[in-house]
């Protein structure tokens, strides 16, 4: 890998850490350059500005998720198994990528201003289309109920999974349950999967 590409990757990794901790407006380019092991001029040369770097990080983190979800394209599964796999892939991605969760939370505070600029929405739309096609296939095959609202199912899957990690600290305190515990996470994943499948499967 060329030195320039290595530097750019280091900058993106360091920026993801800092932006997830402090948001766009709290982050400092000095801290990002220090963590990346490069000077500020290199950051501006690659990304133009702090805002340009932030949008690049958003694009990068959504690309990671998109690659994970697109694994479904290479699987030959029944519609029900494909929905279960989609939920599992999304849930485990969120579990293993806490900086992604925090970046999305910050961007919600920004009212998705920089997400629109980054092109991350287009990346996410690819996996949404994959899930949409799976649900349509299930309806056509008579596996899923004919009257399900596909858009609402997709929203629900994403919201159920995401809220497990965006609200993990408050729910741990409110429910007095260790949501960081591996068994609790497995139970949460199983519950979400059962809820969705119970709702969409044709009896």
Image (cartoon, grey):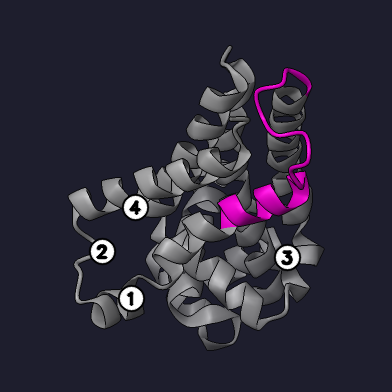
Mark 1 surroundings: few (<14), some (14-19) or many (≥20) residues within 10 A: some
Which residue position holds label 3? 115
Q: Earlier in the sequence, mark 1 or mark 3?
A: 3
Cα separation, mark 2 vs mark 1, equals 8 Å
Would you say the residues marked 2 and 1 are in contact, meaning their CB atoms lie under 8 Å apart? yes
| Residues at circles 2 and 3 in contact by the CB criterion of under 8 Å | no
* Marks 2 and 4 in Cβ contact (< 8 Å): yes
Q: Which residue is mark 4?
A: 188
Residue 107 visible, this orientation: yes
Foreground mark, 1 or 3, reads: 1
The residue labelled by disc 2 is: 179
**Which residue occupies 70% across, 74% down?**
51
Name which of mark 3 and mark 4 comes first in the sequence. 3
Q: Residue visible at 67% across and 48% down?
A: 154
Q: Which residues are magenta?
A: 140-158
Residue wearing tag 1: 171
Residue 65 part of the magenta segment = no
- At mark 4, the secondary structure is helix
Residue 23, image x, y percentages: 54, 80
How far is the residue under mark 2 from the one under mark 3? 29 Å
The residue shown at (57%, 60%) is 159
Q: Earlier in the sequence, mark 1 or mark 4?
A: 1
Asked whether residue 14 is in view, the answer is: no
User: Foreground mark, 2 or 3?
Assistant: 2
Q: Earlier in the sequence, mark 2 or mark 4?
A: 2
Q: Nearer the viewer, mark 3 or mark 4?
A: 4
Residue at position x 68%, y 81% in the image: 110
- The quadrant where residue 113 appears: bottom right
| Label drawn at residue 84 | none
């Amino acid at each position: 890998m060329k030195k320039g590409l290595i530097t750019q990757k280091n900058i993106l990794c360091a920026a993801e850490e800092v932006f997830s901790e402090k948001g766009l407006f709290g982050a400092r380019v000095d801290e990002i350059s220090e963590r990346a092991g490069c000077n500020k001029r290199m950051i501006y040369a690659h990304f133009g500005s702090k805002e340009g770097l932030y949008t690049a990080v958003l694009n990068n983190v959504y690309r990671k998720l998109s690659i994970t979800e697109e694994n479904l394209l290479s699987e030959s599964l029944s519609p029900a198994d494909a929905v279960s796999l989609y939920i599992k892939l999304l849930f485990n991605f969120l579990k293993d990528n806490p900086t992604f969760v925090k970046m999305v939370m910050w961007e919600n505070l920004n009212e998705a201003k920089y997400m629109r600029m980054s092109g991350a929405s287009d990346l996410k739309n690819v996996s949404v289309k994959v899930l949409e096609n799976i649900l349509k296939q299930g309806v056509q095959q008579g596996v899923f109920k004919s009257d399900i609202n596909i858009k609402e199912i997709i929203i629900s899957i994403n919201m159920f999974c995401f809220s497990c990690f965006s609200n993990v600290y408050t729910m741990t305190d409110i429910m007095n349950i260790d949501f960081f515990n591996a068994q609790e996470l497995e139970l949460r994943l199983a519950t979400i999967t059962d809820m969705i499948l119970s709702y969409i499967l044709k009896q």
